[in-house]
Image: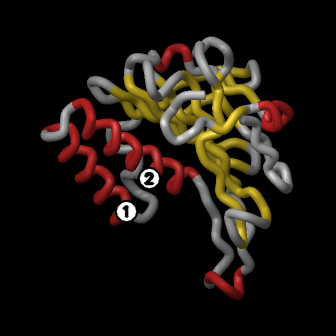
Amino acid sequence: MAVNLPGAPAFPVYGLSDRVEGLRWLCTWQRWPTLEAGVVWQLCIGHGDPSQGPYALVTTTLKQLPWPESEHGPAVQSGLDHAVSNAISNLVSLSCRSDPDEEHRTLLAELERFTEVDGVGHFDGWELEDVPIEGVRQGVHLRRLPKAWAFAAELAGVVVTGWSTDDIPFELVELIDLSEDIASIELLPPNGTR
């Protein structure tokens, strides 16, 4: 079922190119002031089939979040720090499925260090890797685990994160702007099938 988001995103929405085969589906989105109405500030697009095979998720988030300063304190910015924290959280989730003991504890400790450190050491264990973004190779921060990976990138006006198991090799990651295709991307039902 195609989803008509009232108020299309006013920012580029990134996803993976056709190098990653399978379904392309709208996973989640965030709007302000409510999920039912308001400004879209985050979209997550899935690639692959979560019910039958590997899949990857790519989330695009506005850097300048839409809520007013008066309601939430100082103006809220989403940036690379937020993206890396989000990516680590998702790796924690993936690690529960692959190695719930050692890898999971390591990532939880990394997430805790990340949230305690202000501007220093956020990228311990991360490497800079070039990937094609709209046809131009650009650097993204990459965190590899024995069975999963995550990346975080800061682009003009947005931050982009992605994660998957190694069933989808990171070498296939090529980001493209899917903004014009949003209306045709289907919402995957909760059971993961069409």
Number of numbered labels in the structure image: 2
The C terminus is located in which quarter? top right
- Residues under labels 1 and 2: Cα distance? 8 Å
| Residue 186 against residue 65 in the figure, above or below | above
Residue at the location (49% across, 31% down)? Answer: 128
> Which mark identifies residue 115?
1
Q: What secondary structure is found at the residue carrying circle 1?
A: helix
Q: How crowded is mark 2: few (under 14 residues within 10 Å), some or many (20 or more)?
A: some
Residue type pointed to by label 2: Ser
Task: Tell me if residue 66 comes above or below residue 168 in the rendering.
Answer: below
Q: Is residue 102 left or right of residue 57?
A: left
Secondary structure category for the residue under label 2 = helix
Q: Is residue 193 left or right of residue 149?
A: right
- Along the line of sight, which residue is nearer the eye, 108 or 48? 48
User: What type is the residue that disc 1 sits on?
Assistant: Thr
Q: Residue 85 carries which label?
A: 2
Q: Residue, x 72% and y 35% (percent of image)?
A: 1
Mark yes or no: residue 141 visible: no
Left or right of 194 on screen, residue 190:
left
Image position, residue 104 (x, y; %): 22, 43
Q: Can you give x and y, in whole percent of width and height, for residue 129 in the image?
A: 51, 26
Going by the image, does 192 lie left or right of 25? left
The residue located at (74%, 40%) in the rendering is 13
